Amino acid sequence: MILYREDDYNAMSLRAASIIARELKSNPALTMCLATGETPEQTYRILGNMCKAGDANFSKAATFNLDEYVGLDYGANSYRTYMKNLLFDHVNIRPENTHIPRGNSPDTALECLRYDRLLDSCQSRDILLTGIGMNGHIGFNEPCSALDGRTHIARLSQGTRKANARFFDSIDQVPELAITMGFSDIFHFAKIVLIANGRKKAPIIRELVNSQKITTQNPSLLLKLHRDVTVIIDKEAAELL
Ligand code: F6R
């Protein structure tokens, strides 16, 4: 695991965006897996600017998103809308190359299978950008006694719903279920980049970096089994190291 401690959120974002831009340069047909949430917002803005400046070319790239809420239309809080607003509308990616689980599918179990089939059809899976939940969740793989390997329906923990309530009018509006890629899907990506910023992430980052044990009660610890993980944090998230 490579660890970069950056001065602030912007430097963290710049480091992550630069890694993605570098990978895109060496492999224009890059297959990426992307996260949503507050953490990657600036990374996406920087990638949009890089694309406008001719420093990143998404024309042959493909993206898969880690997760999507169940039951939301493509309205303000769906991850489809988030990705469109923050990244897809600002880079030259082909819309048909952007994949996000359809959380509004009438048959979510079938949707999980469809997403897995799409993932399985990739020639390669190159780089995955992820945030981390305060409880160590990756995607919506929440702490539990056993983790699912493939794309599945996840029940959001109360803590996660509370944390994500900031994007909604109230916690009652935060969906209870999401479709998320599982750890087998995540591990198929050759390179994993995890970003975290802010004091509230310091305890989980301390556990991720320092723990010698691996437990599904903190799913992020599974990343220690992957051979190419880069963790990029700002000063505040590094505070307890
Ligand atoms: C979202 C996702 C989540 C977030 C995590 C951190 O697609 O996969 O695991 O990465 O909840 O969220 P923020 O960045 O809002 O702190």
Image (cartoon, helix red, strand yellow):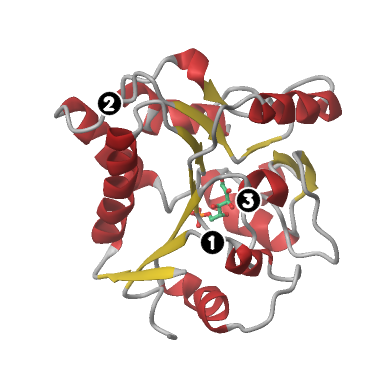
**Amino acid beneath label 1:** Arg
- For disc 2, the marked residue is 57
**Amino acid beneath label 2:** Asn
Q: Cα distance, mark 3 to mark 2?
A: 25 Å
Compared to residue 149, the image places residue 219 above or below, namely below
**Amino acid beneath label 3:** Phe
| Residue 209 coordinates in the image, percent (x, y) | 51, 78
The residue shown at (52%, 47%) is 190
| Residue 117 coordinates in the image, percent (x, y) | 73, 25
What SS does tag 1 mark? loop
Contact, CB < 8 Å: mark 3 with mark 2? no
Q: Cα distance, mark 3 to mark 1?
A: 9 Å
- For disc 3, the marked residue is 187
| Residue 29 coordinates in the image, percent (x, y) | 41, 26
What SS does tag 3 mark? helix
* Crowding at mark 1 (Cα within 10 Å: few <14, some 14-19, many 20+): few
Q: In which quarter of the image is residue 169?
A: top right
What SS does tag 2 mark? loop
The residue shown at (30%, 36%) is 26
| Lower sequence index among marks 3 and 2 | 2
| Lower sequence index among marks 1 and 2 | 2
* Crowding at mark 3 (Cα within 10 Å: few <14, some 14-19, many 20+): some
What is the count of numbered marks? 3
- For disc 1, the marked residue is 227
Contact, CB < 8 Å: mark 1 with mark 2? no
Q: Can residue 103 be seen in this view?
A: no
Instruction: Point out the image quarter for the C terminus.
Output: bottom left
| Lower sequence index among marks 3 and 1 | 3
Contact, CB < 8 Å: mark 3 with mark 1? no
The residue shown at (44%, 50%) is 38
